[in-house]
Image (cartoon, rainbow, N blue to C red):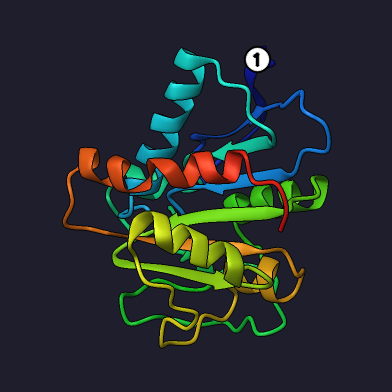
């Protein structure tokens, strides 16, 4: 029998919306800690949808997975509410992490990297989660490139996910990402980070069919 899936922590966005972290706690021996993160960019809701679908399957089917699974379905609820990439302060959250290469930037779309690293409550919350739990693998879900990107020691996992999804592995997306989550966790903390870039021209049903097994693969991952 699995333990209950439950809300572990919550925080508030700039506009006071809830940002919730859920935990599925495994009863197996020697579990890994796996984190799933969705909707860093508000106009990329696909990750939140996939995580919600998987949470619903867990509630309905009560599986017995090997690993502890942590779920943050929506990091940027303010941006999602208005279909906007940045948060309510017009900060690109994926350029706001405290990395060695963070720079104060105004981007072409008018968003900024923040007044300083980790200036936003959303990135502060996710950073605190990283500090509180010893994650073995992180899956961060984005769009629209249809590739499996990775940072840190995650090449093998990226290749396995590529076999599942038929999305190619692409280590370099071709543009600089100072202050990114992948740099923060993967390159600087040496945590295997997969950035699963979904296509933006698929139905929700097709996205789930293409990616469902990724969640099950990570939920029962044995070794890194």
Identity of the residue drawn at 51% across and 56% down: 140
Tell whether 30 sits left or right of 100: right
Q: Nearer the viewer, residue 208 or 166?
A: 166
Q: Nearer the viewer, residue 23 or 118?
A: 23
The quarter of the picture where the C terminus appears is: bottom right
Q: Is residue 82 visible to us here?
A: yes
The quadrant holding residue 67 is top right
Question: Where is mark 1, residue-wise?
Answer: 4
Tell whether 133 sits left or right of 174: right
User: Relative to 78, is 154 above or below?
Assistant: below
- Expressed as whole percent of the image width and height from the top left, the position of residue 12 reads 58, 37
Q: How many marks?
A: 1
The quarter of the picture where the N terminus appears is: top right
- Expressed as whole percent of the image width and height from the top left, the position of residue 120 reads 60, 57
- Expressed as whole percent of the image width and height from the top left, the position of residue 188 reads 74, 75
Q: Is residue 95 visible to us here?
A: no
Q: Nearer the viewer, residue 218 or 185?
A: 218
Q: Residues within 10 Å of mark 1 (few under 14, many from 20)?
A: few
User: Relative to 134, is 186 above or below?
Assistant: below
Q: Nearer the viewer, residue 49 or 16?
A: 49
Identity of the residue drawn at 47% across and 58% down: 161
Identity of the residue drawn at 48% across and 35% down: 17
Tell whether 206 sits left or right of 88: left
- Expressed as whole percent of the image width and height from the top left, the position of residue 201 reads 16, 57
Identity of the residue drawn at 58% across and 46% down: 218
SS at badge 1: loop
């Amino acid at each position: 029998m699995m333990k209950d899936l439950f809300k572990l922590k919550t925080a508030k966005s700039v506009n006071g919306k809830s940002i919730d972290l859920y935990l599925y706690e495994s009863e197996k021996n020697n579990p890994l800690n796996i984190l799933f993160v969705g909707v860093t960019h508000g106009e990329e809701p696909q990750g939140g949808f996939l995580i919600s679908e998987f949470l619903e399957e867990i509630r309905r089917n009560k599986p017995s997975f090997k690993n502890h699974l942590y779920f943050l379905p929506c990091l940027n609820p303010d941006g999602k509410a208005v279909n906007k990439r940045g948060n309510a302060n017009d900060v690109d959250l994926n350029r706001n992490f405290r990395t060695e290469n963070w720079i104060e930037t105004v981007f072409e779309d008018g968003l900024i990297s923040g007044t300083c690293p980790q200036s936003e409550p959303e990135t502060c919350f996710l950073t605190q989660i990283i500090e509180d739990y010893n994650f073995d693998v992180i899956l961060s879900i984005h769009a629209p490139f249809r590739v499996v990107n990775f940072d840190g020691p995650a090449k093998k996992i990226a290749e396995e996910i590529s076999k599942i999804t038929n999305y190619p592995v692409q280590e370099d997306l071709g543009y600089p990402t100072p202050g990114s989550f992948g740099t923060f966790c993967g390159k600087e903390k040496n945590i295997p980070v997969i950035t699963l870039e979904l296509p933006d021209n698929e139905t929700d049903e097709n996205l789930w069919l293409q990616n469902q097994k990724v969640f099950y693969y990570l939920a029962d991952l044995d070794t890194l």
